[in-house]
Amino acid sequence: MIKRYSRKELTEIWSEENKYKIWLDVEIAAAQAMEKLGQIPKGVASIVRKRARINVKRIHQIESKVKHDVIAFLTSITEKAGIKARYLHLGMTSSDVVDTSYNIQLVQSGKIILKDIDQILRVLKKQARKYKFTPCIGRSHGIHAEPITFGLKLASFYEEFKRNRERLVYAIDQISTCAISGAVGTFANVNPNVEKYVAKRLGLKVEPISTQIIPRDRHAFYFSVLGIIAGSIERVAIEIRHLQRSEVYELQEYFSKSQKGSSAMPHKKNPILSENLTGLARMVRSSVVPALENIALWHERDISHSSVERNIGPDANITLDFALVRLASVLDNMIVYPKKMLENLNLTKGLIFSQEVMLELTKTGITREKSYKLVQGYAKKCFAENLDLFKIIQSDKLIMSKISIKKLKSIFSYSKHFKNVNLIFRRVFK
């Protein structure tokens, strides 16, 4: 992943250094279990832990000759740890180390991403409460629909990220498994108690049945959840981008004093961070289909999934982490224009109250079809001629014989639309 869209905490998790460190942890834990079972001499694990050194460059040198990363790793460890290291990996297969370690990296990443989501939830909660009763227009198909509040919009995002958090917690649980079962997963040359010990030692669960690899439906689920979270990021980002358009301008991203919006046009203030988030979300989602395709491997294993995971593992996690942190900052620092929201709310001169006029007419005995046609006709006229719906309705003798002027005035007010805001907030922010 390029540095521009990476944070140190995640890049360190996916570094070669950390990967080999985890491999060593797996091998040492397995050696400790084998010592307890009397399968290898006492002291092997402690000697290896004391003497072993991770030398990425040396591992790559050996791999260039032997064409096998795990063998290259074990050889490099033996060079430093000495003859005792020959007892490492007894009865194990490469996937035991690689798969267990890969899951640990996913768990480490997932826990940081959970913290990122928690920060977004804190910001959304704060902003939703701040703008709880700030009136703005709700849009359907991009067209003015009926009044809502900006706080409700933010509360909707909050509830979605709550669901994302729940999904990710479950996805981390699904990926928290360990397999030390040997070739084709039969434990022919490794005691099942080794797997049990390693799992407990490394904070994982035993994989109930592995086929030499940990089943890839677990990974597909994890990456699918990352893709869903990315979709939520884009949903918020697109809303910000739309609301910052010049014709709308209900809010904008924070624009610093020395910031420049365009190399050609000095007046420009562009929603570049939200646009960036839209692009990053696409990148994260692009990992979902390859992860799903990794489920179907030949028989007990092949390595067609390996090259995919070497790419999507770091890329999807690092990118999503960066995007979530950026989104939290955008939401926390956005500039909101309540007056512009109110101005846009009144832009169509009362057309947004057409439904309630129609419903009130049906209560007086006029059929829904006739009521709809009558109100729609006036709405079209108002829109075409830039007229005020209240005044047009007031001039209709039939309607005014059915609806009192007091009732008509109550229809053309926002209060009814906001009467259940508190109820909705109680549901969301329990």
Image (cartoon, helix red, strand yellow):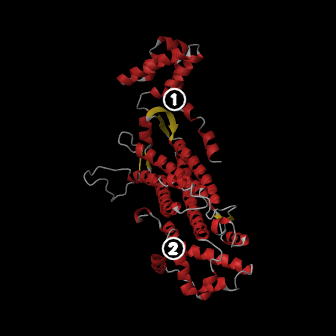
Q: Is residue 113 above or below residue 244?
A: below
Question: Badge 2: few (under 14), some or many (20 or more) residues near its Cα, within 10 Å?
Answer: some
Report the amino acid beneath label 2. His
Q: Position of residue 88 (x, y in %)?
A: 63, 80
Residue extending farthest to the right is: 37
Per the image, the residue denoted by label 1 is 413
**Whole-Å distance between the Cαs marked 2 and 1?**
73 Å
- 217 with respect to 307 (left or right): right
Q: Residue at x 56, y 21 (%)?
A: 359
> Which of the pair 333/109 is nearer the observer?
109
Side (left or right) of 192 relative to 159: right
168 displayed left or right of 41: left
Name the residue nearer the viewer: 281 or 147. 281
Which quadrant of the figure has residue 180?
bottom right
Instruction: Specify the label residue 242 is tagged with.
Output: none
Query: Hey, what amino acid is under mark 1?
Result: Ser
Please indicate, yes or no, whether residue 121 appears anywhere in the rendered image: no
**Quadrant for the N terminus in the image:** bottom left
> How many labels sit on residues?
2
- Secondary structure found at label 1: loop
Residue 44 location (% of width, % of height):
66, 84
Q: Nearer the viewer, residue 285 or 258?
A: 285
Q: Which residue is mark 2?
A: 68
Residue at 53% across, 20% down: 358
Q: Position of residue 313 (x, y in %)?
A: 51, 62
